[in-house]
């Protein structure tokens, strides 16, 4: 979000505090907690529902199609965040965008719970639109509570980040258990209820946000025409598909989406480098952003295997019996947010300590370690899958170890990437560059589905092949980032 929009958001923020923080932070903490509860809870069972046999209440889709749909869903939630931010800035304000997004998410999950195949896919589209509206704007409202900036804002975002992971942990834990106990439909109903609670508490306590995110500058108001046009295209596509006029191939659609995301990224950076009138210093920093963008795509393409190939691995090849109880496969998705909650303070302490001693690691080095941690996690899964090939179920500790390594990679790369992209961007392009960061996550999420689709359950040997290939992607990309560190550091031209 650009500087002018942030100043508009920050108008008339109330002075009430709670434990030294603005009272409105609790409102946004709980809103985001319930949204992430819904998002990660549904994600923990999504691919398992799609591949489950119709006789078991699932959709009975093959692994490749299900993986492509999973990737399309992930990618669209990040991509629609760009549109959601624009709608808030130009049309309805951040508070109304959060409420609208929450309603969309709750309604979308309710549609998933109906159990009808056609309505299920409409529900996914509605949920993705809701996430795109809510996710970027609830974060913008957090920033608006701290117009003075500084360390107090950093502390506020730290509390907010804990809400994100608390919601992810509770959702990944609760929804799979609920679905296993009462059926898929009730599993999807629980996230709908969670988001409804989040919207309700936001409406009841939004007074603590004052007019932040409500007032739009008259000279920045936009037109509803682009939004209406996009919605018309989506509605027409859904109608043509439901009537059988057009038959969509999820695998082809996912591949086309990846190409479209990639072309968009290349086109933007080409514009930035050659046609935006940048100085030599700014152009060098833009080249660094290109490297970080590519590394981010690689990381998320591997990391998002958690909800696809790893989830299928947990379901089919993991011994989940504990004291006579069969742990639902999706419950293992809660391990990652648990590790994030546990180790994020340790990584923050590490970066601060290194910085005080003048030994802070450059961005490229942190990215390199993040990618190598990612690769090492897939090496663990490669050996686990070799045991499966030998005909044995494996213990959940293989997945737990992998999630630990991937959490370390996430903490090296994700918050660092957000920070450095904002620092490297020319001041007049900060908002656009942050959009490119989310585009990298959209492309990575979509590629995750395509990679997972390379696993063929009828040819089990494809599983270790998938894991070892992603290991090499992570290791090589991480090594390249480490080797480029001296060059990247020079090209950053003083940005730290």
Image: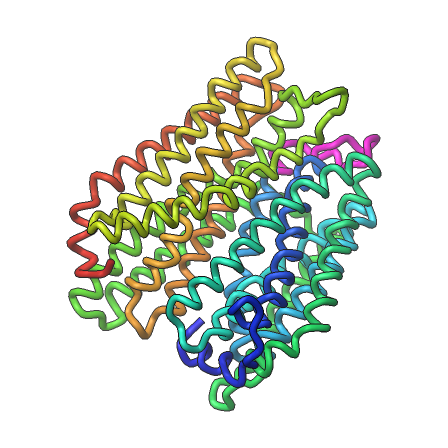
Viewer-closest of 132 and 250: 132
Residue drawn at (81%, 31%) of the image: 56
Relative height, residue 9 to residue 102 (above, below): below
Is the N terminus in the top left, top right, bottom left or bottom right quadrant?
A: bottom left
The single residue placed furthest to the top in the displayed view is 390
Instruction: Classify the position of the C terminus by image quarter.
Output: bottom left
**Which stretch appears magenta?**
51-66
Residue 426 screen position, x and y as percent:
28, 69
Q: In this orientation, does residue 245 appear?
A: no
Q: Give the image location of residue 424, x and y in percent.
A: 28, 62
Q: Nearer the viewer, residue 319 or 124?
A: 319
Residue displayed at 70% across by 21% down? 321
> Considering depth in this image, is 411 or 314 the residue closer to the camera?
411
Left or right of 152 on screen, residue 394:
right
Looking at the image, residue 30 sits to the left or right of residue 292; the answer is right
In-image side of 66 versus 213 (left or right):
right
Rendered residue at 63%/20% (across/down): 317
Q: In the displayed orientation, state which residue is furthest to the bottom.
A: 218
Picture quadrant where residue 334 is located: top right
């Amino acid at each position: 979000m650009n500087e002018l929009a942030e100043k508009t958001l920050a108008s008339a923020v109330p002075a009430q505090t709670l434990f030294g923080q603005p009272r409105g932070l609790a409102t946004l903490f709980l809103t985001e907690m319930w949204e992430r509860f819904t998002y990660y809870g549904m994600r923990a069972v999504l691919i398992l529902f799609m591949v489950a046999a119709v006789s078991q209440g699932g959709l009975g889709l093959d692994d490749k199609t299900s993986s492509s749909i999973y990737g399309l869903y992930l990618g669209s939630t990040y991509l629609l965040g760009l549109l959601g931010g624009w709608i808030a800035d130009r049309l309805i304000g951040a508070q109304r965008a959060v409420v609208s997004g929450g309603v969309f998410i709750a309604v979308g999950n309710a549609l998933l719970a109906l159990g009808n195949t056609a309505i299920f896919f409409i529900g996914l589209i509605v949920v993705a639109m809701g996430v795109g509206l809510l996710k970027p704007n609830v974060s913008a409202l957090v920033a608006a509570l701290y117009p003075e900036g500084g360390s107090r804002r950093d502390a506020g975002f730290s509390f907010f980040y804990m809400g994100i992971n608390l919601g992810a942990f509770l959702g990944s834990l609760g929804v799979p258990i609920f679905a296993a106990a009462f059926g898929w439909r009730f599993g999807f109903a629980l996230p709908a209820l969670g988001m409804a609670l989040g919207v309700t508490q936001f409406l009841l306590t939004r007074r603590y946000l004052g007019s932040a995110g409500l007032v739009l500058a008259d000279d920045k108001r936009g037109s509803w025409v682009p939004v209406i046009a996009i919605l018309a295209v989506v509605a027409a596509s859904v109608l043509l598909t439901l009537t059988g006029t057009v038959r969509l191939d999820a695998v082809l659609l996912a591949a086309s989406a990846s190409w479209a995301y990639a072309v968009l990224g290349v086109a933007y950076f080409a514009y930035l480098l050659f046609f935006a009138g940048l100085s030599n210093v700014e152009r060098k920093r833009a080249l660094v952003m290109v490297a970080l963008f590519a590394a981010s795509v690689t990381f998320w393409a591997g990391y998002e295997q958690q909800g696809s190939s790893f989830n299928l691995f947990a379901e089919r090849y993991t011994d989940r019996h504990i004291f006579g109880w069969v742990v639902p496969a999706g419950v293992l998705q809660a391990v990652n947010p648990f590790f994030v909650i546990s180790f994020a303070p340790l990584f923050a302490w590490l970066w601060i300590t290194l910085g005080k001693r003048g030994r802070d690691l450059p961005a490229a080095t942190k990215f390199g370690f993040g990618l190598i941690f990612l690769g090492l996690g897939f090496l663990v899964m490669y050996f686990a899958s070799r045991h499966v090939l030998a005909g044995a179920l494996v213990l959940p500790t293989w997945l737990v170890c992998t999630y630990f390594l991937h959490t370390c990679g996430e903490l090296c790369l994700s918050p660092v990437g957000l920070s450095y992209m904002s620092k490297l961007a020319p001041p007049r392009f900060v908002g656009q560059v942050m959009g490119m960061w989310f585009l990298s996550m959209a492309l990575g999420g979509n590629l995750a589905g395509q990679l997972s689709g390379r696993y063929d359950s009828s040819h089990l040997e494809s599983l270790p092949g998938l894991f070892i290939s992603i290991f090499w992607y992570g290791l090589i990309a991480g090594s390249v980032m480490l080797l480029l560190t001296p060059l990247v550091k020079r090209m950053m031209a003083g940005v730290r």
